[in-house]
Amino acid sequence: MTDTTTALEPLVARLAETAPGLRVETGPGSTGLYAYDASNYRVPPRAVVFPRSVDDVVAVLRACRATGIPVTARGGGTSMAGNAVGPGVVLDFSRYLNRILDIDREARTARVEAGVILDALRSATALHGLTFGPDPSSHSRCTIGGMIGNDACGNRSVRHGRTSGHIEALEIVTADGVRAVADRTGLRAADPEDRDAVQRVAGLEADLRRLIDGNLASVRTELGRIPRQVSGYQLHHLLPENGFDMARALVGTEGSCAVVTAATVRLVATAQASTLLTLGYDDVVDAAEDVPEILRWNPTAVEGMDEAIVATMRARRGPDSVTGLPEGRAWLYVELDGDDQAAVDARAGELLDALKSQGRMTGGRVVHSPAERRSLWRVREDGAGLAARLVDGGESWPGWEDAAVAPEDLAAYLRDFRKLLAAHGLTGVLYGHFGAGCVHVRIDFDLATDAGRTATRRFLSEAAALVVEHGGTLSGEHGDGRARGELLEVMYSHRMIRAFAAFKEIFDPEGLLNPGVIVAPARLDDDLALHTPSDVLPVETLFSFPHDEDGFAGAVRRCVGVGRCRSDAGGVMCPSYRATGEENDSTRGRARLLQEMVRGGTVQDGWRSAEVRDALDLCLSCKACSSDCPVGVDMATYKAEFLHQHYKGRVRPRSHYSLGWLPLTSKLAGYAARPVNALLRGPVGKLLARLGGVTTKRRIPAFASRRALRRALRTVRTGEPAKTLLFVDSFTRAFRPEVAGAASRVLADAGIPCTAEEDLCCGLTWVSTGQLSLARRIMARTVARLDNGDDRPIVVAEPSCAAALKRDVPELLGTDAARRVAARVHTFTGALTDLAVPGWAPPELPDNVVLQTHCHEYATFKGRHPRDLLGRLGVAQVDEAEGCCGLAGNFGFEEQHYDTSMAVADLALKPRLDDIDPRTPAVVVADGFSCATQIDHLAGDRGIRALHLAELLDPAADRPGQPGENS
């Protein structure tokens, strides 16, 4: 085993000489991020390198060989078996080596670099009516190189099988820095003019042929027995009858034999028609019993899951987030495809009838709605995250999440596996690729104590014996990694284990490539992330983190690394990652650094850590992760708590004072709005902005006078007592009082007239800048005024303030009074959705609306979406800019964040505004003050103004959105 204590300086110096410009990170702010993947393991690397070319990879491997430092190749970092963490240098291919080099429509192939995201490849090939067949649930962030590393499969593996079946050629770099090509007929040097490389590669191939010739019987009898047999090395592809297919033999080697830099992959035609059946069962074993019959109908997918996942999804994203499932406690998704939709639908009906005759289903239906099908697949694809932190708060872990048997043996295996769980007093959440016999399960192991780890070892050993007894494999697609490598001896003969070792030694005689997996594996209970030192950071916080047993430590532990925050395939998170592409700007990266801070690992300065502060710097506090993240990570809250602790007793950034105290300063400005606005429009305004850490690239919004607010809130005479309380937040009061007036008129028109509370604050700006002690005092005053025996619904026109009252107030104060107030809070959309009198209809609305939904509304008020309300009220087309506007309260006003703010706006909002035809101006709706301000900034002099929904629906407006008086 390589000595990883070797000094890093010679490596860095060598790389500076041989690969100038190569990005090499050695600080805790990077090594802490890359100490984890999506597994149970934590292995801090010595350095993280971001290659831009194959020459960079060659330079790194040669330098590592010269200095004796191991290398681990990494794609999206979504490995659940620990195959993407290592003790030496981690090569992150996803950042720069991510180009699609060629698509050959006629040959149905594509040549791609290893860091290409699967969805990026599928989007590019879709233009040609083609796609890449394997589709793991992490398709929005996993890389092709990572899929090659563990021979990934996916939801449609019933039709398309494993990645290895779609590989034509691999471009590799060996451990000693030689470039080669592995294809369907063998191995050759990438440059035929390089005599040394030609000789080296020829020697490799000769050694490999001798290895196979000496182990023909074992390879033929032990490997390739069932469709999902991923464990070990796939040496059977090198058999004479298989043509010495070197490309397929290297797939699934987990970067332990060579580093893949590019691949030529085979593509398949996109189906012209498809449909989805959802089948309900009382039990997952009953569901598995029906799999053999379903497979007779040639489906593309047969996926299973149990009720715990569905319940967690509904709790996380709202009760309407999962529809289309029949009655049951376990379900199968069955997808059929073909050339004609009518024929596919007819076949689906016939299959449903056939299954009903089997008598095991509790119900079934054909799902015709594309939107409903997308939402159902979202539940299945988020299974790993949803199962990690269930609705009851319980935690579960991978480790035995990837076993597979032949599909016809699945029911018997599941029956015995559940008995094994019960015998060990464990609970498992089951889901997976039932049509391929591959079961994913997350189990409530106790990995934090010595006794729990001992019990886990015992269970895993017995589970390995059980799956082998059923003719199965330890891994069906995730690879062996650190989780199962030690157990390979249960599955394979000693002769085969020696053959695996010889195969690796031919390629990597010094054991530098991804040590600890498959060959000479680490113990499965070494390097566990939950094995924390005893001197962890004491965590006493102001936020209560009521949903996490261990408070802040348990909250940041929610991140299990599945990496949905690194995708841009639906949802709102994570805007900063989408803008920069940097791991430390992702929700996952920040959570991992916070975990390091809590454990006192690579980050050793605790709350004073500059690395954590810098990683959190570009977090927009949008709260989208609290909804979009399958495990409910809430980085906005973690950031607020960190800033509070970090700056306790210290001078803060200037913007924390200028923007954090905005509710107070804006209130004072309201008494002299005209002179204040005149002052701010001149040179003094720019000077004040600079002194306050505020960008001068934005116009400071004009303050409204107190008189303007009184005019806006003139009594609306309805003849009815007030049924709601309109909470006039600081932003509405200070900058757009006309919204308060419009809201009061719309509420009256909807049969829920209001009175207004004009002089309270939710404390949001103090929370977002981490001034939590002040926020608590302000919130306590607000709660005392609102919790006065009045149980009327509280309607808040500003979504961010509504979210603060709904979530931040009870979690910071922790009192029954705060919880009572929070329970009464509605957004303006929510009030009209839930409280308006039946049959209410607003004035005539436009046919088309461009909508920017506030991130806090999206995250906090699930199922009460402005898009849905506008549709119900008669707007034919709602063109929503899905994602953050980029301003995000104080963030986009801060001088150092302006460029990132605009980069985030470029992702969704700006393209929507640019599409507006100036000859037929569209109505733009944005309830959030930040969103409306950003729209005004982006629109410039184009005459586009964002309306609050209340202004659009205002019965007193001459036309939708007539502006009010601000001064």
Image (cartoon, grey):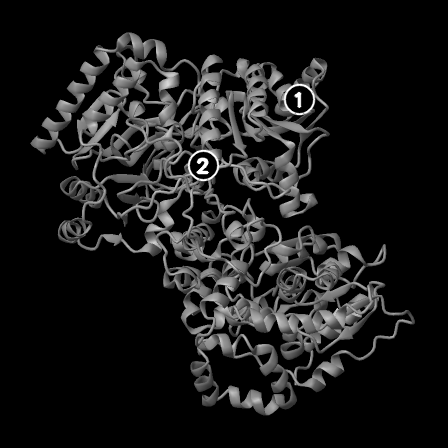
Disc 1 crowd rating (10 Å Cα; few below 14, some 14-19, many 20+) is few
Point 15% across, 27% down: residue: 201
- What is the C-alpha distance between the residues marked 1 and 2? 56 Å
State left or right for residue 260 relative to residue 353.
Answer: left
How many numbered tags mark residues here?
A: 2
Residue 510 rendering spot, x and y as whole percentages: 18, 32
Question: Vertical placement of 479 versus 71: above or below?
Answer: above
Q: Is residue 953 left or right of residue 175?
A: right
Q: Which quadrant of the figure contains the C terminus?
A: bottom right
Q: Is residue 375 above or below residue 845?
A: above
Residue 284: quarter of image: top right
Relative height, residue 41 to residue 916 (above, below): above
Instruction: Give the structural element (helix, strand or loop) at label 1.
Output: helix
On the image, the x and y values in percent for residue 666 come to: 60, 81
Res. 450 mark: 2
Residue type, label 1: Ala
Which comes before the other along the chain, label 1 or label 2?
A: 1
Q: Residue furthest left?
A: 195
Residue 637 in which image quadrant: bottom right
**In terms of depth relative to the viewer, which is nearer, 368 or 179?**
179
Question: For mark 1, what is the residue?
Answer: 346
Residue 90 shows in this picture = yes
The residue drawn where x is 70% and y is 83% is 708
